[in-house]
Amino acid sequence: MQGRGSRSDQPFDVAIVGLGPVGTTLAALLAGRGLHVLALDAAADLFNLPRAIGLDQEVMRVFQELGLGAAVSGVTSAYRPTEYRTADGEVIRRFLSQEPPYPLAWPPYLTFLQPDLERVLREHLTRCSTVDMRLATELTDLREIETMPVLTLLDKRSGEVRNELARFVVGCDGGNSFVRRHLGIGFEDLVFDEPWVVVDMLVEQDVSLPEVNVQYCDPARPHTFVVGPRNLRRWEFMLLPGEDPAAMSGEDTVWGLLSPWLKRGEARLWRAAAYRFHALVAKQWGRGRVFLAGDACHMTPPFLAQGMVQGIKDAANLGWKLASVLDGAPESLLATYEAERRPLVKEVISITKGLGAIIGERDPALAEERNRRMRADMASGGGTTIRQDLFPPIGPGPLCLHGIGSVNAAGRPSPQPEIIATDGSVRCLDDILGYGFHLLVRQGFEPAPTDRHRLETLAITPHVIAEEGEKGTLCERHAVFRLWMQKHACEAILVRPDHVVLAGLRTPGDLTHVLDAILPVLAAT
């Protein structure tokens, strides 16, 4: 079945294999740049069970770019604080979120139901005129003819087989990715392999359950409780040695596991599924003109709800680079995708593994030592962590310049203040500036004349962000931009199309050095 963006007479700009949240988001981002996209999924419809249930402010910002901020916000709920509790119920650690005003304009973390989110994204994709979306279509072969990827596709409804050409291919087809396996790319094992049962319940009566998310650090059976959106409540139970995953996910066994919280009739079992929680990252994130994103190139234990989040960040990172190359930028720009994302994802997985080790300790003596240590942290005031402080910036690279100007601004999401219009209305900064590179400066920062010309070459416009009450066309409220700049010792920031700070600048001279560094990476010779 051909969609609205059919281009059977010539190559697609990008073919995307797999239309979960990551693939659909990437397709929509590319369509927003006017690219012709072939979007494929082997399934005929959405998978109508919950899987991922957490997303963060950076992901919401991506959906905002797609014009879907309000629609996605409508299917989300607040993310509750998290407590780590001992078997006796003592709180030995807390995770909280940033308080408003929010640095990126969105709440730092939200919960959602994946079928609801996918429905919003999929409906948006059907409205993209340059996207040919084909469901029930399986990729059966992938090869190259004169450096052009050729996809062999099976229409599972009609049995028809056809070939399509694409300038680039991205495999977003999950942990069992056909694209990754076809390329012969293996995983680096980051040494985490645990069997758990995930139970999703729809609570139908007024029952007494925790109002926060809880990690039960119980050596007898480590387990987790998550307050999902609306009436969804999720439990995750570690399986013990010798327990059969199929038997442990049976309904009677599940009700036994839930007995400390629920009785039959108080809630409805939506699903119970046994999983092996892995920590894996692909050894390569692509080959030639074929790339991987999301679960196809990394798998993360769920203790920080980062699986889908990191996949969407893959899409944002790769998407603008593909669009730039197809618009004439050097193809070498695409090498920065793996160079930036792979080390960062490995670090996120390492952090997540560390939390999993805290939760999952089964030796009673070691668990008691853990409790003593974390109890002391709580007593000294160090037992509470802001969740967003856990995550590192993108590391140094050609488009993430840590060595110029501010030492700690590059690689972080840029602030998004709310801007007060002359009529008193308020809009988010991204909605005003639109897509592209942006130089955001404080009052008084003046690029050199030669640098202004070079900025024009790269289609980068400087924007002065004024404080409320100051003169200026972009006056922020709540001082979000000012406080961020003070924290990171900047007078200006150069922001990439994926809203990542390329460099933090203290002086106009810093900008000169930054432009010297990035022009060869971004501009065609």
Image (tube, rainbow, N blue to C red):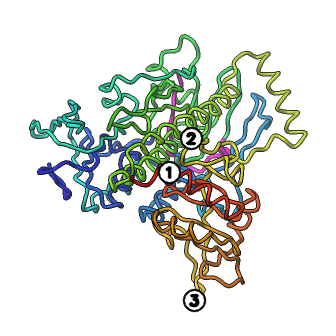
Question: Disc 3 or 2, which lies upstream in sequence?
Answer: 2
Q: Amino acid at mark 3?
A: Asp
Outermost residue toward the bottom in this view: 423
Residue 499 lies in the magenta stretch: no
Q: Secondary structure at mark 2?
A: loop
For residue 236, side relative to residue 290 (left or right): right
Q: Nearer the viewer, residue 441 or 54?
A: 441
Q: Nearer the viewer, residue 118 or 249?
A: 118
Which residue is the site of mark 1? 112
Q: Residue at x 30, y 61 (%)?
A: 34
Q: Residue at x 43, y 55 (%)?
A: 523
Which residue is the site of mark 2? 305
Question: Mark 2, residues whose alpha carbon is within 10 Å: few (<14), some, or many (≥20)?
Answer: some
Q: Amino acid at mark 1?
A: Phe
Residue 196 lies in the magenta stretch: yes
Question: Disc 3 or 1, which lies upstream in sequence?
Answer: 1
For residue 38, side relative to residue 111 (left or right): left
Question: Mark 1, residues whose alpha carbon is within 10 Å: few (<14), some, or many (≥20)?
Answer: many
Q: Secondary structure at mark 3?
A: loop
Q: Amino acid at mark 2?
A: Ala
Residue 211 visible in image: no
Question: Disc 2 or 1, which lies upstream in sequence?
Answer: 1
Which residue is the site of mark 3? 423
Say which of marks 3 and 2 sits in front: 3
Residue 183 location, quadrant: top left
Pointers 3 and 2 in contact (C-beta within 8 Å): no
